[in-house]
Image (tube, helix red, strand yellow):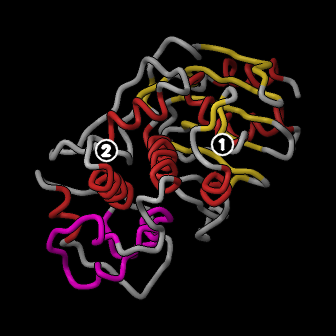
Amino acid sequence: MDFGLFVNDIEKNGWNVFGTEVYQDGTLIHEWGDTRDGLHEVYSATKTVLSVAFGIVYDRGLIGLDDPVLKYISVPAKPGWEKITVRRLLTMSVPGLPFRAEGDNWIEFSLNCDVEPDECGFNYSNICTYLTGVALANVLGSDLGRFIEDEILAPLDIKDYEYLRSPEGYFYGASGMKMTVHDLSKFGLLLMNEGVYEGRRIVSAEYVKMATSVQQMNREGGYGFYIWKYRDGYSINGKCKQKCYILPSRGIIVTYLSHIDDDSHDLLNGMEKHILGIS
């Protein structure tokens, strides 16, 4: 591992990386850039925050993976929705859904979309995550944003953050959170430690194992519950290259936040070469 060469690549190539951290066996061993002060958009990394919230509610026996979504969102829906389970929302397995909801009533828009109830292929849609958040709020009978603040962010000692809400006021779990590099790393530590952070259990090991395992195949190699497969581990991903790579077999976590709005793999390749030793 040569962290200096990774940083040199970032600086030499002018990659718009805000900051990066590397952990080995739970200890921060390298950091560079703005890792602790600036709040940055994490985009779809927000989905992993929602996954942890789902896990806590699931652990309490309040929601079932194979229950129909309409058990928890009891509003009129187009035919076919009665076959869509919570698990399919968590694994992005609802073919037919557009990428995002529109208008002022996202629940109505979403449940009036045509779906293919008997097809379970991977279809990445923010609507899946949004509806999961609505279901959780309904189960809890309280605000999901406040629940996440109290049950996840506070135990992780995350004090500065922002998040978005839908037009109806629901926590928008698909995107919209801002946090620091250091605080995103805490989610990697939580997952690597099977639901425990600094000695406190936040979510069960059973749920973490499910969420970080391949539940749905896709062209990227597999998807869990709002967590992506990465090599022999997994990753938290957001657009414009927001990343937290977790490799339990090696005890390594690598996090970086950036704004690189293209399809290049240069930053990933540099990280793999200099941090993971993969040519």
- Badge 1 marks a residue whose secondary structure is helix
Residue at 55 percent across and 44 percent down: it is: 237
Residue 226 screen position, x and y as percent: 52, 54
As drawn, 34 above or below 204: above
Residue 191 — which label? Answer: 1
Residue 97 lies in the magenta-colored region: yes
Residue at 14 percent across and 73 percent down: it is: 76
Residue 261 screen position, x and y as percent: 47, 38
Residue 26 lies in the magenta-colored region: no
What residue type is disc 1 on?
Leu
Residue 71 screen position, x and y as percent: 29, 71
Q: In the image, 269: left or right of 260?
A: right
Q: Which residue is mark 2?
A: 172
Q: Main secondary structure of the magenta part?
A: loop
- For the N terminus, the quadrant is top right
Q: In the image, 146: left or right of 105?
A: right
Q: In the image, 158: left or right of 255?
A: left
- Badge 2 marks a residue whose secondary structure is loop
Residue 180 screen position, x and y as percent: 51, 22
- Nearer to the camera, 277 or 232: 232
The answer to whether residue 27 of the structure is visible from this angle is yes
The residue lying furthest to the bottom in this view is: 118
Whichever of callouts 2 and 1 sits on the residue coming sooner in the sequence is 2
Task: Count numbered badges in the picture.
Answer: 2
* Residue bounds of the magenta highlight: 69-98
Query: Pointer 1: residues within 10 angstroms few (<14), some, or many (20+)?
Result: many
- For the C terminus, the quadrant is top right
